[in-house]
Image: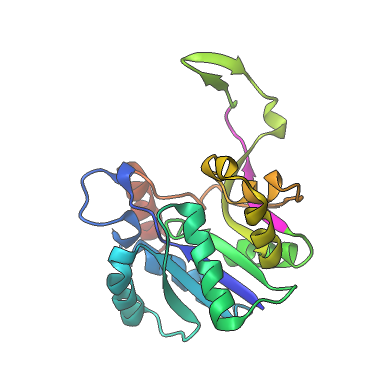
Amino acid sequence: MIYAQILAGGKGTRMGNVPMPKQFLSLADKPILIHTIEKFVLESRFDAILVVCPADWLSHTQDLVSKYVSDERVHVVTGGSERNETLMKGIEYIRDNYGLHDDDVVITHDAVRPFITSRIINDNIEAVLANPAVDTVVPAIDTIVQGSEEKIDDIPVRSTMYQGQTPQSFNIKTLIESYEALSDAQKETLSDSCKICLLAGQPVKMVRGENFNFKITTPYDLRVATALVETRS
């Protein structure tokens, strides 16, 4: 079974004074979240597409999906308090409603990356069917500087540096086993889902993303995204 999980659990604190989480803000003619869901329903290989959202916004999300999306594979699920808890809530839904099998995989994606392409989705599916974990990346354009307390500690070689995007894709049983193997202290350091597998000693395959597959996080990002949609229309 091949599942998609759209992570719509963020609160969007960096978007500034807005009335709702950023995934529900309008991008051109419809909410950002809907733009993203529409890219996933185009892929016929998905057995189910989960939209995992905050509990307080469950009804709102269900209303949006009912209004804009006519695909019975799309299900709205309550998420957790942070990213990886939200990810695991989606996995629990899969386990409880479909059961788990050794070859089941999940392609997870940020709700606020609406410019994902069919090529990126396909590459993730093909890669995760042959690997336990997959990350979508683009080569770093700028030099990466590592430091703390306003002092540079290291400047890594740029040719080995990449910027992580999503989708991030996993063999579901491997993801569960990797997460359960982590200590509470390790779980608190997680800012990226692929790190779950890395900390558990699992290899992570990289696939190529696109620079336009960016995450809408700030008001500037939303302006850029709006201009991009208008240019394409």
Quarter of the rendering containing residue 68: bottom left
Q: Position of residue 1 (x, y in %)?
A: 67, 78
Residue 28 left/right relative to 109:
left
Q: Residue at x 73, y 50 (%)?
A: 204
Q: Which of the pair 65/91 is nearer the observer?
A: 91
Tell me if I can see residue 78 in this picture. Answer: yes
Q: Residue lying at the far front in this picture: please name it.
A: 184
Tell me if I can see residue 116 in this picture. Answer: no
Dominant secondary structure (helix, strand or loop) of the stretch shown in magenta = strand
Q: Position of residue 185 (x, y in %)?
A: 56, 40
Q: Position of residue 53 (x, y in %)?
A: 39, 64
Q: Residue at x 57, y 23 (%)?
A: 145
Picture layout, residue 40 above or below residue 154: below
Magenta stretch: includes residue 139? yes
Q: Residue lying at the far top in this picture: please name it.
A: 151
- The magenta-colored residue range is 133-142
Residue 191 left/right relative to 24:
right
Q: Residue at x 59, y 27 (%)?
A: 144
**Position of the C terminus by quadrant:** bottom left
Magenta stretch: includes residue 22? no
Q: Residue at x 59, y 82 (%)?
A: 98
Quarter of the rendering containing residue 2: bottom right
Residue 132 left/right relative to 214:
right
Residue 194 left/right relative to 224:
right
Q: Which of the pair 95/216 is nearer the observer?
A: 95
Q: Position of residue 156 (x, y in %)?
A: 67, 24
